[in-house]
Image (cartoon, helix red, strand yellow):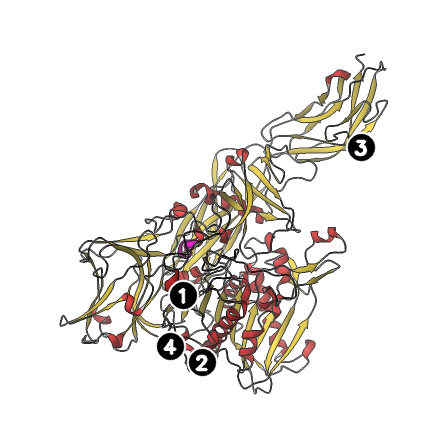
Amino acid sequence: MIGRTARNLSVGIAVLLGVGSLPATAAPPVVAQSNQWDVRPLAVGYQLTLHLDAPAPMRASLPLLEVDGNPLGVAKQSPDRKTMTLVTTDPSVVKAHDVRLVWSGDLGKESSKSRSITTTAGPTDADWLKARRGPLLPSDPGALGKYKVDTAEYNLGDEAVYLPGLKHRSELRGKIYSPHGAIGPRPVVVFLHGRHDVCYGEPSNSGDLEKPWPCPKGMKAIPSYRGYDGPATALASNGYQVVSISANAVNAWDSDAYDAGAQARAELILDHLALWRQWSTVGGGPFGTRFVGKLNLQDVGLMGHSRGGEGVARAAQLNADRGGQFGIRAVLPLAPTDFARSTVPGVAMSVVLPYCDGDVSDLEGQQFYDDTRYSVDGDTAPRSTVLVMGANHNFFNTEWTPGQSTAPSNDDWAGDEKASPCGAKYAGRLTAKQQQAVGTAYVAGFFRLQLGRETQFLPLFDGSDSRAASAGKAVVRVTSQEPRREDLNRFDQALPAGAVSGKATATVCAGVTSTAVRAALPTCMTTDEWANAPHWTTAWFASKTPTTAVTKLTWTGTDGVVRVNVPAWQRDVRRFAALTFRAAPDPAGTPKTDLTVRVVDGHGRAAAVPVSAVSDALVRMPGANDSGLPKNLLRTVRIPVASLKGVDLSDVRTVELRTDRVAKGSAYVSDLAFSSPVLGLSAPAVLLPKLSASNVTVKEGDKGTHTVDFWVRLSRPSIRPVSVYAETNGELGTTVGEVAQRLVFKPGEVRQKVTVPIVGNTRDSYDVPFSLVLSVPHNALLDESFGHGLVKDDDPTPKLTLGNVKTVEKNGVVNFPVKLSAPSDKYVTFAGVLKDGTAVIRKDYRSVNDDGTGPVVRAVDGFVEPGKTTGELQVRILDDRVKEPTETFSAVINTVDGAVLKVPTTLTVTITDND
């Protein structure tokens, strides 16, 4: 199923670019419909439209239209969010029975068998209610510091700055939290909220909703930027300047953005930083000289929630692309989206993942960590993921939390069953205040560690699962990649011959069966519920880019061994704190499994540690197999080097994974290394070359297949190989060929060609916009990561000829002669009005659009389908039993789309009486 789905996702994404909309003159005929949806044929496929009774929620996930349980692609939302439109080539829509709106993050929560979320307790739920806890930190990052916190807001207008990535103007509005009395320039943290409703209240005029920003009269802006008082106050009271900014304009218009608004959010952050560069140096603006000398813009951190997470990741890239004008050194995506598989090298990063995220339910932000961890050779920036059990998407922001918000808000995880590990009544589910306390501890702790070099908080992010007192009962699991480490085996490539012995096999895998369209490797698991496979979920703008490769270890006996030999230059591990790797149980196996880690030195002496003694990584996550649960997430196994008693740590020869704990099992493993938690070095990656895709415009041509070349360029030659994935994306239809390939730049090379097939014809068509998307670069940054293509139709517009009609009264519906001079790929539509002559409307004739009740309908419209030269323009003749003279009326055609016709054109209908 997913092979077709992935192709149609590309088709659907085109709607985000504005492709496939119909002319306003007249709609093509409906070929399938219900009370709330209809399907109309197009030259490039079908237009599927869903009409909602109420506006769709404003969510981080992308809106999808699902037909009979099959998600076809990304839908374009009308400005009032009550109409969803999708263009697809999938012919199954003609036979559709059920069309509904679903969300990209919810595919694991939307089962074709059951739409209700009624999970029962999973087999490991009890284990997670009594989960192991790490040591308590002596210092609490969530505690208030010595400074009183001053707050102030600024508002430069609702349309103060133009965002090229949005093609709209945005507000410049924010709130600053400042340490009162702090001396000298202080580190700066910028908070960016995510995609949420923009305005609340009732508009004075319902038609005003067609322009969602600025807020229509009668409505008020939702102050999402005020929702992070907890972490902002904790940071400011400890000497940091915090600015939380509003992004309502981006949220209002990002359904039209080619990248769902990531570029616009990044530009907005940099615009605010530019304001603060002025206000903190020469002063001005709303604050005069108040902040002069108070902000250190070479020591900057960014926190982005929801789609804001993708925004801050892009801002760090964009800042480096532009020479590092600001010292962005730390990025924290909080419950983020990742639609395009970008990387964030060079800067410290921690991705916070709420286990009960009901919006970005697939926890796709995990891929920021997965994709970045080896993206640049020698990268010295630390990175981690922080998995917060029992936390949802919304409650990190008080303005998105019921009982705390100004505007209406909700718990994004549906259902309140006690049995569900994410239900509101479940013992392991965090209350809003508990979740906000966890958010404060980790957000404040991360930036105090990375910007303030407050190393007492390092254990919060090193995988040891140390706890902050203010985080309370929360169960948190941290995976980290330390700058100081020796990578022994990433487990992303086949092991050498002889490395596996006994009744065990080791297979490199990537992806899941439903996304196998992009997998050159065996798939890791079977699921139609993408939300339970964060490492392998689909990226909507880079659906063919390979996902994380790991090794799947399967055994049927207790004698299985995976042996990793340690090279001579890595054998002295005395300077490291721990042996670490990532692991997770195979969902097709038992809920709990175990392995022994055995370390052997040059004298044959060994130390063995069961995984279960140090980690619950091989215990399945909580939840039953429903609602996208349980998540299949790799977690840290961390074995302190000091616990390897009797082993010569200066001469470690092998590290073994042994199956002696459980007779039969299966597990995923990844990223074996010796490491030590250190602060590392973090700064804008200005020394990396930048990758950009060109823009191309090409004529369609008349016949056969020709090609057009995109050029992917490096900003400068590199001494190391550089690679990046490139794929076509958009409404490709039958005109643009699908291309997906990995580009490799050898040292010294600065450009690579991507050749895209273009199929020509002699029929008039719409221009076809599409994109070449770059993703997951290695040893480079993404600059212009979307190359824009346009196939221009070069065929003449056909002429439309309409004729008069002579008919007999008894004939009922009659058709005007409608003829095109040549077939077209467009729907040719035309419309006008009916005018009485001696014949009177509703007495002698009426429009086919008029059912005879209500006001008289004089509108008349017609069409010619793609590929045909004859079409329809109909009127209904009314028969009576009264003898009458010959009568006439006219149809005045005053609009036409897709053909040449002189307007107005008047057509005459002559009715001969038959009584």
Disc with the residue nearer the chain's start (4 vs 1): 1
Task: Place residue 839 in its image quadrant.
Answer: top right
Q: Residue furthest left?
A: 603
- Specify the quadrant that holds the C terminus: top right
Q: CA distance from mark 3 to mark 1?
A: 68 Å
Disc with the residue nearer the chain's start (2 vs 3): 2
Q: Identity of the amino acid at label 2?
A: Arg
Q: Identity of the amino acid at label 1?
A: Leu
Q: CA distance from mark 4 to mark 2?
A: 21 Å
Q: Identity of the amino acid at label 4?
A: Pro
| Residue placed under numbered mark 3 in the picture | 856
Q: Are marks 4 and 3 in contact (CB under 8 Å)?
A: no
- Mark 3, Cα crowd under 10 Å, few <14 / some 14-19 / many 20+, is some
Disc with the residue nearer the chain's start (4 vs 3): 4
169 or 62: which is nearer to us?
A: 62
Q: Identity of the amino acid at label 3?
A: Val
- Mark 2, Cα crowd under 10 Å, few <14 / some 14-19 / many 20+, is few
Q: CA distance from mark 4 to mark 3?
A: 78 Å
| Residue placed under numbered mark 2 in the picture | 453
362 or 426: which is nearer to us?
A: 426
Q: Are marks 3 and 1 in contact (CB under 8 Å)?
A: no
* Residue 624: % across, % down: 41, 54
| Residue placed under numbered mark 1 in the picture | 129
Element assignment for label 2: loop
